[in-house]
Image (cartoon, helix red, strand yellow):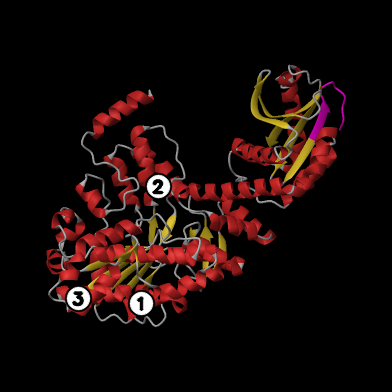
Amino acid sequence: MRNKEKIERSMFLGDTLKLPVGIENFEEIRRDGFYYVDKTGLIEQLLNQWGKVNLFTRPRRFGKTLNMSMLRYFFEIGADPTLFDGLYISQNQKLCAEYLGKFPVIFLSLKNVDGLTYEKAMYRLTELVGMEAERFSFLQSSEKLAENERERYRALTTLREGKFAMNEDLLISSLQVLSQLLYRHYGKKVIILIDEYDVPLDKAFQHGYYRQMAALIRGLFGQALKTNDCLQFAVLTGCLRVSKESIFTGLNNFKVLSITDARFDEQFGFTEGEVEKLLETYHLESHMEEIKRWYDGYRFGDADIFCPWDVIGHADRLVEDPGAEPQPYWINTSSNDLVKRFIGKADKTTRDEIERLLAGETIEKEIRMELTYDEIDRSIDNLWSVLFTTGYLTLDGEPEQGFCRLRIPNEEVKEVFRYQIRELFRESVTNHTAGLETFWRALSDGDGKVIEEQLNRILSNSISVFDARGERRERENSYHTFLLGMLVGNSAWGVKSNRETGDGFADLIVETDNPDSGMIIELKSVDRFSELDRACRQAIAQIHERRYDQILLNEGRSDILAYGIAFYKKRCRVMAERMQNESVM
């Protein structure tokens, strides 16, 4: 059936444009036949709502780099007007006549400026600037430049043993120098585009040289954006709005356009109408609800926004496989260390708040839109703010007096939180096996009371990763993962999960280090605390009726303990029975 659907779909698509999975170059998309969601209205808005230096802050993977590439191909001298044929901006003929292909453009994307040391990261930035300068090789022989100016250009591009030779002082002044030389050559002021400006700061913070990198970026931006008479205007994008005092000191012409700003709110990410049109193009309309549930939910200004990276990734899979299940495409490409750090620092109050978010509720927090990276870990409140600005949380309603109602935007981001919670739990089990010895001993002895006490204690101090209102099977899977993590910590035991045996599949089978003994564990999740005892009895009965002990008996293990364990939220009940009808409760 699925193959037939694929054939029919391919016949429908015919010459339909390819989906641009991972492509962030505007020219490549337009020239090589890829589908493009028209964001050229950004050009008109930028020029009408004038700002000398414009900073857009949006989460990763929301089309920032593609938009910056589009700006470059529009404004840069020598631009190909046909790239914009049929797009929104082409309707504004007066604007196109005045601005299309009329300015020198310096374009840098700092997303790969990284290194374990400051020196290595600084060279990555040096290399980036040097390669951008090489695009303007005509400057080294330009007759509109004086000899000393041509010498200044050569200093930006000189190689020594195959590496750019710029020192730190020259790097700091490099964008201003390049602007001056381009202005002298063309007689036109320069547009500067800097994509992912904050990545070097983020990496520097992680690797321990934040202050050095902050000083370098502050100097570079200060000369390029503040004291640069050859600047037409500048656009920067990033994830975090770094405190003005730390990076953008003295920039009085600075306009910040954050995720709470209604201006430009539809220019990064996809609107619902844009997603509907894309799905209609590829005959995927029936998947709108699942895409909405997994990849929608972001609130930018007054607009509800989908993550474009996810929508394109999932649509591309659906074209080939109509039965493909949603996956966390954005999350698989981004570092989730921030969520891990946040959960690791969570106290009891914060753990309760995380559980509320995972259950689909909202929480209210005071959000700081300006932070420095070295402030992030100073308090849990700062981490709440960063989770909001980086897209792991989003607004629910309008901010009131600096306080925001926050929620997890969609199923994809919920999966990130669940995954990191499970990973931290597994690490805790691995690193603190001594604390689990009482639990393991009680399991071997059939001591249901002690097992119950141990599980209740651990549950009360952990973060629930299930939605209490969700499907019962989904909740049972979460408890299954929780208990499995505790069992596999015992390296002397063999643990089998969902193994076929007898007349069904047992939840957990444990082969102990005693070759004559073993355990069978059946789990249940209930909707009310009063149902725990009954659910335990049902679990024990299921073990008997479906002969789950068969796999252990076949291995010569005759001393078998059967456990029925039932869960309600963070409480559990345990019943144990020897399969020889000798009760050990």
Task: Give the mark, 3 or 2, whose residue is nearer the N terminus.
Answer: 3
Q: Could you say which is closer to the camera, residue 52 or residue 10? A: 52
Q: Is residue 104 magenta?
A: no
- Which quadrant, please, contains the C terminus? top right
* Residue plotted at (50% across, 47% down): 411
User: Viewed as shown, does residue 128 lie left or right of 90?
Assistant: right
Residue at numbered disc 1:
254
User: Viewed as shown, does residue 418 lie left or right of 305?
Assistant: right
Give the percent coordinates (x, y) of residue 85.
15, 54
Kindly report which numbered mark, 3 or 2, lies closer to the viewer in this rendering. Answer: 3
The answer to whether marks 3 and 1 mark residues whose Cβ atoms lie closer than 8 Å is no
Task: Give the mark, 3 or 1, whose residue is nearer the N terminus.
Answer: 3
* Residue plotted at (50% across, 50% down): 413
Which secondary structure, mark 1? strand
* Residue plotted at (46% across, 52% down): 334
CA neighbours of label 2 inside 10 A, class few (<14), some (14 to 19), many (20+):
many
Which secondary structure, mark 3? helix
- Residue 141 in view (yes/no): yes
In the image, the segment drawn in magenta is 575-585
Alpha carbon distance from label 1 to label 2: 32 Å
Give the percent coordinates (x, y) of residue 214.
46, 73
Residue at numbered disc 2:
310
Q: Is residue 468 above or below residue 395?
A: above
CA neighbours of label 3 inside 10 A, class few (<14), some (14 to 19), many (20+):
many
Residue at numbered disc 3:
183
